[in-house]
Image: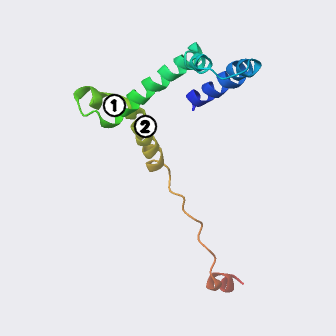
């Protein structure tokens, strides 16, 4: 999402206004967009994240297993603590309901 928003921002606020100021649409204008430092930085960051997520999903080596353990440990700990909290709550016992016989005998 960040990559897309970076591309839209760079196009709308930097490149398109300059492109429309001069006639024609030469290759140099498009190449200028792809060479933009902010766009290249966002693209490189997106590529690193994609590689990390791919490795997290399918890497079956020792490094991949350790990476998965580290990534999912907080989630497992949260679930374990939540389970403890729920297990240690005092059960809610409803008050006994009045029956017709109890009401009639007290009258």
From the viewer's side, name the closer residue of 71 and 11: 11
Give the x, y percent position of residue 105.
65, 85
From the viewer's side, name the closer residue of 23 and 2: 23
Answer few, some or many: residues within 10 Å of disc 2's Cα (few below 14, many 20 plus, some between 14 and 19): few
Decide if residue 90 is on the left or right side of residue 17.
left
Q: Nearer the viewer, mark 2 or mark 1?
A: 1
From the viewer's side, name the closer residue of 44 and 67: 44
Q: Is 97 above or below relative to 92?
A: below
In the rendered image, the residue lying farthest to the left is: 61
Secondary structure of the residue carrying numbered label 1 = helix
Q: Which mark is residue 55?
A: 1
- Residue located at (39% from left, 28% from top): 51
Colour scheme shown: rainbow
The N terminus lies in quadrant: top right
Residue of label 2: 75
The C terminus lies in quadrant: bottom right
Q: Is 51 above or below relative to 34?
A: below
Answer with mark 2 or mark 1, whichever residue precedes in sequence. Answer: 1
Residue 6: which quarter of the image? top right
């Amino acid at each position: 999402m960040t990559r897309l928003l970076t591309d839209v921002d760079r196009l709308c606020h930097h490149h398109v206004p300059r492109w429309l100021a001069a006639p024609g649409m030469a290759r140099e204008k498009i190449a200028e967009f792809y060479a933009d430092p902010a766009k290249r930085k966002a693209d490189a960051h997106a590529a690193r994240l994609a590689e990390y997520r791919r490795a997290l999903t399918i890497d079956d080596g020792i490094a991949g297993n350790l990476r998965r353990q580290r990534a999912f440990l907080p989630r497992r700990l949260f679930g374990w603590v939540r389970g403890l909290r729920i297990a240690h709550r005092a059960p809610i016992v409803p008050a006994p309901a009045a029956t017709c016989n109890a009401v009639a005998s007290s009258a």
